[in-house]
Image: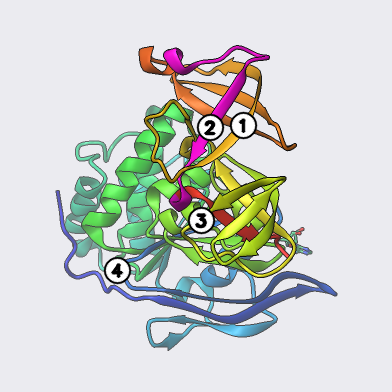
């Protein structure tokens, strides 16, 4: 394994960037600071502006206003090849007629680095992605995961200050994709490169990133650690987008109390002001109330409407007595099955006040 101590670790700063196409704003006043060595994912629904944001970082899209900084350098008007940025695309964009070695050293050729410096750089790039000995192979002789690693080595060989990735794993099957997520995360830890990663897969973003930036309609809605995003979404849009959550309308009673129908629910988190409030119920935070739950837990009563076997878990759908529906999961093991109810049976669920999260509507 090779460390790359020579790598310049720089942060990137997007300042009040807007991209307008006529009256439509693909990006609307977006500011984002990515720290040196940080891994930040951009996550959002289709058309929310992720690729546009990556494009203005890479220099393929010119912002209508605002500026882009790489460390202390204003790169807003620099062409892509002068930006010191490595890019990995979804389809890898490898040259099929070239060998692995020729593909990886391509950026050195493009940058006119003396040929005498290539072998050493190629050797460490191959070691970095664990493909030593593959330099003569043709691209079509590689697996999807290996191709992805070649693309990564090619993006990293010139030691760029910033690496941009646009859905780089989306063409891989589920198993390989999950392995590559872990591999990429390890690689990032080892190399300390600054990475901005676009994905529409929330699980991928939560798994890999130091922070995730959630986009909607050209704007950043929340930029936070995966844990904060999941457990403390800024609003109903983020709550619906992250994790498996049901949102139920509630009324504010006090700073620590809301009402769901006639049922009072306590929370340890300050209840936001306003009349458009929702309780965020993540299925994994609900437990069947069987006496073993925390005594301060909120209780939700209802009738089981359906059960769905999903391999590692059983998803149980419940119609609440006060109106509203939600689902929760039981592990598909002996203990889980012991708590199972059949459709038509009454059930009581417990939700700890710390897991009782209230958000405002997206607004
Ligand atoms: N050249 C263009 N002219 C006009 N509108 C554009 C142009 N490029 C992008 N857009 C619009 O800007 C919005 C954001 O597009 P963008 O490609 O950044 O979204 P995205 O979040 O990457 O979506 P996806 O996940 O589908 O790739 C979309 O509504 C798109 O139609």
Q: Earlier in the sequence, mark 4 or mark 1?
A: 4
Crowd rating for badge 1 (residues with CA inside 10 Å; few <14, some 14–19, many 20+): some
Characterize the local packing of mark 3: few (<14), some (14-19) or many (20 or more) Cα atoms within 10 angstroms: many
Residue 349 among those drawn in magenta = yes
Identified at 66% across, 70% down, the residue is 273
Give the mark, 2 or 1, whose residue is nearer the N terminus: 1
Q: Position of residue 137 (x, y in %)?
A: 32, 34
Left/right placement of residue 110 relative to residue 254 reads: left
Question: Splitting the image into 4 quarters, where does residue 192 fall?
Answer: bottom left
Q: Position of residue 125 (x, y in %)?
A: 24, 52
Q: Quadrant of ligand 1?
A: bottom right
Element marked by disc 1: strand
Residue 299 on the magenta segment: no
Residue 238 at what x, y percent from top left?
Answer: 60, 55
Q: CA distance from mark 4 to mark 3?
A: 60 Å
Task: Kindly check if marks 4 and 1 are in contact, taking CB atoms under 8 A apart as contact.
Answer: no
At mark 2, the secondary structure is strand
Judging from the image, what secondary structure is the residue with disc 3 in?
Answer: loop
Front tag of 4 and 1: 1
**Whole-number angstrom distance, CA of label 3 to CA of label 2:** 16 Å
Q: Are marks 2 and 4 in contact (CB under 8 Å)?
A: no
Q: Which residue is mark 1?
A: 301
**Residue located beneath label 4 in the image:** 113
Question: On the image, which quarter does residue 77 sit in?
Answer: bottom right
Task: Name the one closer to the observer, 277 or 15.
Answer: 277
Where is residue 34 shown, x and y percent of the image? Answer: 42, 72
Residue 45 in sight in this render: no
Tell me the tag on residue 349. Answer: 2
Q: Which residues are magenta?
A: 337-354
- For label 1, being within 8 Å of ligand 1 is answered no
Front tag of 2 and 4: 2
Q: Which mark is residue 267?
A: 3
């Amino acid at each position: 394994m090779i460390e790359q101590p020579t790598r310049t670790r720089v942060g990137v700063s997007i300042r009040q960037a807007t991209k307008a196409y006529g009256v439509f704003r693909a990006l609307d006043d977006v500011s984002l600071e990515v720290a040196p060595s940080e891994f930040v994912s951009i996550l959002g629904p289709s058309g929310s502006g992720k690729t546009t944001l990556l494009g203005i970082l890479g220099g393929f899209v010119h912002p209508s206003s605002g500026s882009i900084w790489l460390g202390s350098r204003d790169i807003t008007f620099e062409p892509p090849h002068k930006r010191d940025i490595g890019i990995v695309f979804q389809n890898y964009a490898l040259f099929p007629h070239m060998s692995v070695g020729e593909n990886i050293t391509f950026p050195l050729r493009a940058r006119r680095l003396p040929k005498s410096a290539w072998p050493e750089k190629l050797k460490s790039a191959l070691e970095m992605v664990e493909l030593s000995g593959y330099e003569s192979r043709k691209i079509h002789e590689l697996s999807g995961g290996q191709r992805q690693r070649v693309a990564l080595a090619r993006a990293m060989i010139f030691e760029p200050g910033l690496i941009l990735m646009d859905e780089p794993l989306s063409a891989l099957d589920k198993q390989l994709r999950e392995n590559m997520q872990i591999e990429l995360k390890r690689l990032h830890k080892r190399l300390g490169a600054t990475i901005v990663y676009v994905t529409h897969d929330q699980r991928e973003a939560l798994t890999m990133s130091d922070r995730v930036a959630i986009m909607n309609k050209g704007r950043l809605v929340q930029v936070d650690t995966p844990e904060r995003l999941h457990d403390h979404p800024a609003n109903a849009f983020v709550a619906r987008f992250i994790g498996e959550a049901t949102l139920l309308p509630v009324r504010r009673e006090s700073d620590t109390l809301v009402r769901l129908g006639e049922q009072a629910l306590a929370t340890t988190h300050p209840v936001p002001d306003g009349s458009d409030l929702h309780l965020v119920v993540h299925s994994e935070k609900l437990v069947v109330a069987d006496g073993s739950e925390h005594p301060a837990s909120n209780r939700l009563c209802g009738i089981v409407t359906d059960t769905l076997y999903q391999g590692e878990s059983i998803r149980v759908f419940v119609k609440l007595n006060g109106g509203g529906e939600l689902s929760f999961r039981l592990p598909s093991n002996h203990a889980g099955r012991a708590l199972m109810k059949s459709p038509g049976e009454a059930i009581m669920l417990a939700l700890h006040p710390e897991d009782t999260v209230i958000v405002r509507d997206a607004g």
